[in-house]
Amino acid sequence: MKYNGIEFEAIVATPTCGKSYLCDKYPEKFVDMDELKLKLKYVIPENISREELESTKGERTFPRRQTREEYMKAFYEKAEKFYREGKILIAAPHEESIEFFVNNNIKYCFVFPSNHMREEIKRRMILRGNPQKTVDENYDMFYEFYNQNINEKRAAVHYQFNKDEYLEDILKKFGCDF
């Protein structure tokens, strides 16, 4: 994929831009690294809906499957396997995912909301069923997160999304074929 003449192979994107939606819609093309890590860390019921899973953010009540050391080792191994298979890895801006990209020289695009998107992000979080505590924390920290995002220096590309723009739309702009 390419944006403004710069090629990249993976995506780091903030919450509410459509990572899970895209990975669910095109599982043969994309891997949701956060869901991969979550399933290695916890025993997640197979019949849980996306909305139910979203409602547990901030307070996971599932039994732990492995120690941090064990699930992180498995996480990095699986991420490397999917990358070698040619899948596009998509992650939230968690340090362990960014570290994986940096340590493996994988160029990534960092997708995050424009600074005028505070109310829109709150609306999206409510619509997808996030707990009110999580919605409020993200709302209160929006500008701090924005400043961290805009100053992130490891990404090959930065893209600020706007109202009614989701990751699938953004990747189409970048020439990704689905």
Image (cartoon, helix red, strand yellow):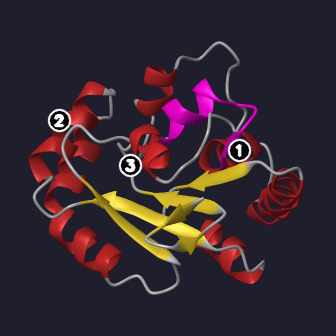
Q: Amino acid at mark 3?
A: Pro
Q: Which residue is the site of mark 3?
A: 15
Q: CA distance from mark 1 to mark 2?
A: 26 Å
For the N terminus, the image quarter is: bottom right
Residue stretch rendered in magenta on the structure = 19-32
Which numbered disc, 3 or 1, marks the residue that appears first in the sequence? 3
Q: Nearer the viewer, residue 71 or 36?
A: 36
87 left or right, relative to 92: right
Say which mark, if any, is on residue 36.
1
Badge 2 or badge 3: first in the primary sequence: 3
Asked if residue 94 shows in the view, the reply is no
The residue that label 2 is drawn on is: 123
Which residue is located at x 18 percent, y 43 percent?
Answer: 163
Residue 171 seen from this side: yes
Q: Secondary structure at mark 3?
A: loop
* SS at badge 1: helix
Q: CA distance from mark 2 to mark 3?
A: 12 Å
